[in-house]
Amino acid sequence: MKKPKLIDYLLLIFLALIWSSAFFNIKIATDSFGPITIAFLRVFLASIPLLLLCYFKKIKIEAFSKEWYWFALIGFINLVVPFFLIAYGVKSVQSNLAAILMSSGPLTSTILGHFFTKHDKFNFVKTIGILIGFSGIIYLFSDNILINENNFLSALLILAGATGYVIGGVLTLKISSKRNENVTTSICIWASIILLPLALVFEQPWTLDPNIKSTISLAYLGIVCTGLAWLLRFRILKNNGLIFQSQVSYLIPIFAIILGYIFLGELITSKVIVSLTAVIIGIYFVKKSSD
């Protein structure tokens, strides 16, 4: 893999900014839309640029092939469940807390990788990283200013959403021989199929009277944070590899805290800073031991 250039680092930072901006935009979207509708429109709008990419690159979409059940299952676990839980949780939890909770993904994936893969086993450094990282998450739950009896469950649901991403990633190994563009487009299609009837039955989105800020935020979540961001991720993966691209996990919670403060005036307590630091250190140790 070639040595990263300045443009590669700039694109990585740009990707981190896009993904971190998703959290405060979800918060804004929840002012007018229910969590199922938010999840549906995210994957539906994301499907549009992905379908166009596959069309112009002449990539066959296998969403309805004989292996359709893998795409449906991964779409449900990797997109439907996390997008719903995050939107539901962020309604009553600060977006910066959601970002820190979601950053537990690399730590959880290391634990699952030990049990479900042949080569990604625990070692001393990984174990230390996992302990430090999850200590930060546990410490975050002690912040009574931001997490209390009214939103404790919401914070747990966001953490469960992060786990859904990881489990979906592990399942993706079952179809790892297929092109990323095909897999991502196919799971978005299935996630849309699953979420549409749920949104129609439980939230009746046609009855909503959304404000302009929520509408713009939701469109941004689908087209930019989900669709465009995945295309950008493909480019970085192709040019620089997975290890380089995975560095985005250090930047997302940092940027999300800054953006939450700028756009929503969210509190940044000392426990938030300590928790964030512990999670980043934990991720660093986990990734360092895997290099």
Image (cartoon, rainbow, N blue to C red):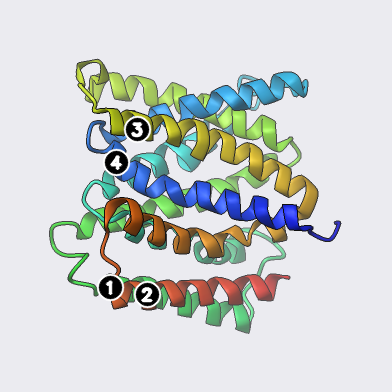
Q: Is 40 placed left or right of 287 in the picture? A: left
Q: Which residue is mark 2?
A: 273
Instruction: Work out whether mark 4 precedes mark 3 in sequence or the reverse, and give the earlier one.
Output: 4
Res. 62 image quadrant? top right
Q: Are marks 1 and 2 in contact (CB under 8 Å)?
A: yes
**Mark 4 nearby-residue class (10 Å; few <14, some 14–19, many ≥20):** many
Question: Residue 187, percent across and down?
Answer: 56, 31
Please tell me whether mark 1 sits on a helix, a strand or a loop.
Answer: loop
- From this viewpoint, which residue is outermost toward the left? 150
**Mark 1 nearby-residue class (10 Å; few <14, some 14–19, many ≥20):** few
Res. 58 image quadrant? top right
Please tell me whether mark 2 sits on a helix, a strand or a loop.
Answer: helix
Instruction: Work out whether mark 1 precedes mark 4 in sequence or the reverse, and give the earlier one.
Output: 4
Res. 109 image quadrant? bottom right
Q: Are marks 2 and 3 in contact (CB under 8 Å)?
A: no
Q: Is residue 104 visible?
A: no
Disc 2 from disc 3: Cα separation:
29 Å
Q: Are marks 4 and 3 in contact (CB under 8 Å)?
A: no
Quadrant where the C terminus is found in the figure: bottom right
Q: Which residue is mark 1?
A: 269
Single out the mark in the foreground, 1 or 3.
1
Question: Residue 18, percent across and down?
Answer: 51, 46
Q: Say the numbered circle drawn on residue 28.
A: 4
Q: Which residue is mark 3?
A: 38
Query: Residue, x 68% and y 39% (percent of image)?
Result: 175
Residue toward you, 170 or 66: 170
Total labels: the figure holds 4
Q: Could you tell me the amino acid type at mark 3?
A: Ile
Q: Could you tell me the amino acid type at mark 1?
A: Thr
